[in-house]
Image (cartoon, coloured by chain):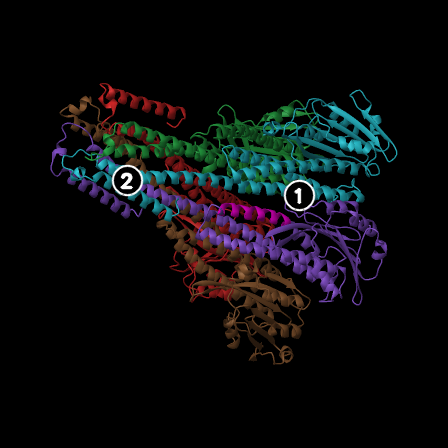
Chain colours: A brown, B red, C green, D cyan, E purple
Amino acid sequence: MAELTIAMTGQPEGTHVTAIVYDETHFEEQTLSPSDDWTACSNKAGVIWIGVTGLGATWPLELAASCFGLHPLIQEDILNTDQRPKIDHFANYVFVVLKSLSHDKAQDTVLHGQVSIILGPNYVLSFHDLDHDTFGPIRQRIRHARGRIRALGPDYLMHALVDLVVDDYIGTLEYLGEQLEALEEEVVEHPTKGTLPQIHDMKQEMILLRRSVWPLREVMGSLARRESTLINDATIIYFRDVYDHAFQVMDTIETFRDMLSGMLDIYLSSISNRLNEIMKVLTIVSTVFIPLTFVSGVYGMNFRHMPELQWKYGYPVVLGIMFFVLISMLVYFRKKHWI
Amino acid sequence: MAELTIAMTGQPEGTHVTAIVYDETHFEEQTLSPSDDWTACSNKAGVIWIGVTGLGATWPLELAASCFGLHPLIQEDILNTDQRPKIDHFANYVFVVLKSLSHDKAQDTVLHGQVSIILGPNYVLSFHDLDHDTFGPIRQRIRHARGRIRALGPDYLMHALVDLVVDDYIGTLEYLGEQLEALEEEVVEHPTKGTLPQIHDMKQEMILLRRSVWPLREVMGSLARRESTLINDATIIYFRDVYDHAFQVMDTIETFRDMLSGMLDIYLSSISNRLNEIMKVLTIVSTVFIPLTFVSGVYGMNFRHMPELQWKYGYPVVLGIMFFVLISMLVYFRKKHWI
Amino acid sequence: MAELTIAMTGQPEGTHVTAIVYDETHFEEQTLSPSDDWTACSNKAGVIWIGVTGLGATWPLELAASCFGLHPLIQEDILNTDQRPKIDHFANYVFVVLKSLSHDKAQDTVLHGQVSIILGPNYVLSFHDLDHDTFGPIRQRIRHARGRIRALGPDYLMHALVDLVVDDYIGTLEYLGEQLEALEEEVVEHPTKGTLPQIHDMKQEMILLRRSVWPLREVMGSLARRESTLINDATIIYFRDVYDHAFQVMDTIETFRDMLSGMLDIYLSSISNRLNEIMKVLTIVSTVFIPLTFVSGVYGMNFRHMPELQWKYGYPVVLGIMFFVLISMLVYFRKKHWI
Amino acid sequence: MAELTIAMTGQPEGTHVTAIVYDETHFEEQTLSPSDDWTACSNKAGVIWIGVTGLGATWPLELAASCFGLHPLIQEDILNTDQRPKIDHFANYVFVVLKSLSHDKAQDTVLHGQVSIILGPNYVLSFHDLDHDTFGPIRQRIRHARGRIRALGPDYLMHALVDLVVDDYIGTLEYLGEQLEALEEEVVEHPTKGTLPQIHDMKQEMILLRRSVWPLREVMGSLARRESTLINDATIIYFRDVYDHAFQVMDTIETFRDMLSGMLDIYLSSISNRLNEIMKVLTIVSTVFIPLTFVSGVYGMNFRHMPELQWKYGYPVVLGIMFFVLISMLVYFRKKHWI
Amino acid sequence: MAELTIAMTGQPEGTHVTAIVYDETHFEEQTLSPSDDWTACSNKAGVIWIGVTGLGATWPLELAASCFGLHPLIQEDILNTDQRPKIDHFANYVFVVLKSLSHDKAQDTVLHGQVSIILGPNYVLSFHDLDHDTFGPIRQRIRHARGRIRALGPDYLMHALVDLVVDDYIGTLEYLGEQLEALEEEVVEHPTKGTLPQIHDMKQEMILLRRSVWPLREVMGSLARRESTLINDATIIYFRDVYDHAFQVMDTIETFRDMLSGMLDIYLSSISNRLNEIMKVLTIVSTVFIPLTFVSGVYGMNFRHMPELQWKYGYPVVLGIMFFVLISMLVYFRKKHWI
């Protein structure tokens, strides 16, 4: 099962650790390596954000665990990239696991990843299994003191990270929505053999998406209901906003699933209708010519005594009869709305 | 995703802001522009209703936000026209987002819009993304002091707005119900090729409707359970009434969905039955004439020694045999209820 | 939507108002008209029951509202015959809306109506939109002091009314159950073209029934949980009994729906099986005669040099070969279990 | 509806009433008749169990009601054999209605019955609408003081009765499970015409079973949660055990339903696959011989000037061409994997 | 029903009882036989784990029951190998029943078993109906004092056992996931006759799996919510972790079910598409040659007066007409996209 979904996950090639310490007036950025003094870093004043991308190497996880006193199970959960989205409340920190989705425009595929976030009293730790700087825009906002991020605490930073993950979902769903619209047009206008596997792929993609997103609701709900004291009153409204977005993502996935079911029905009916049309042509051509062939066969018999054969107008009369039968049948089929 | 549903939304062409201040005895109406003094307006005695239609320009939103002290997230939610219906309780006001539906008789289409309503201690703000005076009838009722609207506070005004939105749903569903009935008759009486896409369109429409309406229930429930102190005891019964209507709308949509599923089954069966009938004709014609053709083929062979060919009554005997075979087969098919 | 269901509702032709006042010893019955003094009536000692059938005229509603001090919304709900079954608890009274179903044996159809009941401290008001004396049997029981009805209060009277409505459901379902059984036998024994529309009609009927009955459960539940102080301890057991019946009605509808789905599957399979049988006959007849026809065609060719044609026993040999081919094919098909 | 299920219920032929009074040391058994003194019986020390089988006569019910002070509604519920399984808590006793199922090995059918049990402070009354000594084994256990039944109170006796009913479900499901296995083998190995009605019957049986068993869960849950003070702490664990069994029965029914759906899919696919195979034979035989027949038809024409006819080797050449066409087509079909 | 699932269960051949007593410093291991003094064993200091594999003999169960004072129902539940997963809280101990799944690589099948675990204040009893040392790895960990298992109490030991069972589920699902992937590829690339039974088998397997795993959630939830005082604060986080895994297992099964449904749709469509292609070939060949055969039949008639037959170029003209008809039809079919 792990293999099944990991197959869709990018390779963790490198591991990068960036530490940022900031408050309303100061800002400090540093790339951490195993030889750096993490404890010094974790004791600084202000909000501390240590962001890890790529889980190829495990030293950032081990150093963070010992430095911030994390429970051993958390390390296991972060490394198990087939984890279900969940939230765990510990005494001093909150641990959140999310699935990340991003649309890689270059390769036109959807990348699945896993983001783990730990919120402590004065720090946020983020781990992303993809070596992809997803949280770059937030680092920019902090660096240039854009928006309210510098004025608020680590809970708002966590909100910003989660919000970005959910926004990526919405972006990915917009992309999938465009594909869906194109597919629907194809289904209604000119379905081909290749349409069925496409619908199938979209359905399987939705099944996997749903599995990633469904538990998100309860994670978000737990944050929005403020079950942790680490989240301030002023921030709660922002988490409620993300909660609404998560709901919207779920709704959209369900809507897409319903639409795909409808499209499958339409596709199968179109294919079946087309077969009907072909069948009708066969019916009409066969039904018209088989009796005529029989008539010609009768007068092709070699009996010695067949008076009609000797008649002067036998041939044109038979041709006339055949023509009459042909016209009658066509008129009959027309009346039955078969042609 | 946003694109997907916005495609169904009308263009926000112009932006109109109407301010109404009223109590039981006074009534004042004014069109606001960016240069007007909004603060003066917001301090007046009585119920203040500022209605904005069309969200092309953002100044009404910004002025309202600063004037009534709205949270920045509210502005974002109002402008994001792909918002999910929801209710947010703030310290001093309640924020409600609804989807509006209206049946445009001229173009025979269903218009989807978004209505945001903010209820404060003495004011109501309404924002509609369509440039369409949906709330005109309420303005008329206030202007001419019809009904109890002038006697009651802003909570009753909010109820009137929400009620109108839900009533539009019912009207739209009546229109769709008529279409559904026509479609059902078509399916049962004389299904054509065009019937399937129509059923499909109705189903997709229902999926989108359901998505708009489903969250309405909890919004209405929250209002009817009186979770906000801004709603008075006397008004709560009116909200409960709207809550019942919202439930009725949901029921109707579910009923329509069930009916459409039934109609799809019937349609596919009819099409398949029709194919059966055509197949039967083919079967009978072919099955009857193919053996006869074989017989005529036998006596069309050119063997030198074929005694039957020399018989005086060979030809009529063979014709008689053929006729007998024909009749036997028809009788057999008749007995089998195939014709 | 309103139109959709009202189409199934009988015409409100006349309006009849009957007032009954009774206690254990006294009984008084009166037909009320607009000119009567309703207030006098509403002040009498004992249990007062005012029953209105047919909502063509609105004066009974208006007089009752003013006399018993009903909320204006109640009047609207009673007149809106597309109301969803519901219960509303007011300070002094309980308002219940139900759907009535009755099987009209004369016309062999199911009549849909709406019953509104208001239970006050010493009165019961009932409104039925059909001009049909549904509650006649209860009036008889009161008149002749049968059962415990005269000994108990207005809450027991209300129970009697509701019980009668639910009993009509059970009666209607028994009638539909008989139709269903007949339909099932038809489907299994000898399905015809007309079977499909019948299944379809039953399914649509069930969808509408379900919509009427589903909310009944919560109405009954609210009464059985004794959320109103107007219902006495002694009566609660009777409401619990009706609650059980309502559940039973729901179960039966769900069971019927499941059965109809099963019958549709069987019907479609039967039709498809029948096509298979016809196809098989075609296959066999064509497959058997087409090769034979080819053989006869070969010896119908006019080549000058065809040695077989000159052979003395050519003709019987060819006939023998044909016969052998025919038998071989039939044996092969037999072995394949195709015939 | 009543008729629908009663049709499956055995005839209540006779009515037998057995009274047992026991405690740890004493045991007394008696057959009661209308003329016996029931009150004397109900006042005896120890656990009193009055068991009624067959509801053809109503005197046991009436005598029990007056003797133990039962509510009139209980009598109605016991006699209405289309009652839904339910539990009602009264002041002095608990009333439980269950559906009984038993597999009649002689007739190879499943018998549906109704069991009503009333648990009082020192008595248990049981009513079974079938004239069938279902509870015989328990009477044996009491008579011979087997197990802990003599040591415990009426609540344990009630548990024993309920447990027997649920065990009969499990037995019946085992029997149905064997039938299902046989049916599955038939579907996969050699489906026949009769398979479809069998699947249909099993499905309908499951729908009815589910309807009988589903409410059992809440009945059992109510007993296991010990909502009645008539059930002792020591007995509660036994009710919890029955509750688990009821859940298991539900699970099994749902599993059987899922399996039957799967089998229907497989059956329909098999039938359709078989049609495909027959169609393929038709296709190949027709497609191969129709062109050859055309060729022979060409050389059967009677034109005066047809040079090929005069050629010495015309006939064998044409036969050769025909053979070549035949082989080419067969090779083509082979390559396409059609044969 | 019992038979149905037991058919999938391995034979309980032998019965082995291993007793382990350990604390942080000591470790003792012993194989118990009926003649050993169990009471001595159960009084030892430290954590006592008695593990029974294979339920062929019942003496370990009886000795354990008398030694640790177990309720008689527990013995029945352990021996009934068709038990539903459940948890029962007793005064001094907790009783848990689980289904075990393991992938037997040698025989390439999935083995279903039943694990019963009893957690007491200082002991854990485990019963596995398969004679298979599932819990060997845990015994190793204790023996060699690997991990934290020696430092923590019996609740942690129970967690380790449960965790192993759930991990086996994940392993089995990985194996099934690989099979599913292979099957999907087969369905999309080259579906054969054997594909349908395979999909069917996988579906039935999933139905059975779901039935085993679904109740696991509530068992795990009960443990993770710490409804028993036998579980310490420090261990609760580990149970929460297993709870997450159980959820993940459920999600995966549901995902597999959805995928299998999708695959069945695709398979049926592929088969139907293939039939369409074969039908098209038949249509085209028949439709092309039947009219041509008719023409040749006309000129094979033996009328004395057929002027065309005498024309010098009659034959080539007719051949030309035939050729023209052939080409026209092929062009028409091409234009219709039928070939």
* Upstream in sequence: badge 1 or badge 2: 1
Whether E206 is among the magenta residues is yes
Q: Position of residue C282 (x, y in %)?
A: 37, 33
* Residue B192 in sight here: no
Q: Which residue is mark 1?
A: D248
Is residue D39 shown left or right of residue D296? right
Whether A215 is among the magenta residues is no
Q: Secondary structure at mark 1?
A: helix
3D distance between C-alphas at marks 1 and 2:
64 Å
Alpha-carbon neighbours of circle 1 within 10 Å: few (<14), some, or many (≥20)? Answer: some
Where the C terminus of chain B falls, by quadrant?
A: top left
- Magenta: main secondary structure equals helix
Q: Which residue is mark 2?
A: D291
Q: Which residues are magenta?
A: E195-214
Q: Residue furthest front?
A: C312
Q: Position of residue C280 (x, y in %)?
A: 40, 33
Front one among B329 and C199: B329
Q: Quadrant of residue D2?
A: top right
Identified by mark 1, the residue type is Gln
* Residue E143 in sight here: yes
Q: Position of residue A266 (x, y in %)?
A: 41, 46
Identified by mark 2, the residue type is Pro
Where the N terminus of chain B falls, by quadrant?
A: bottom left
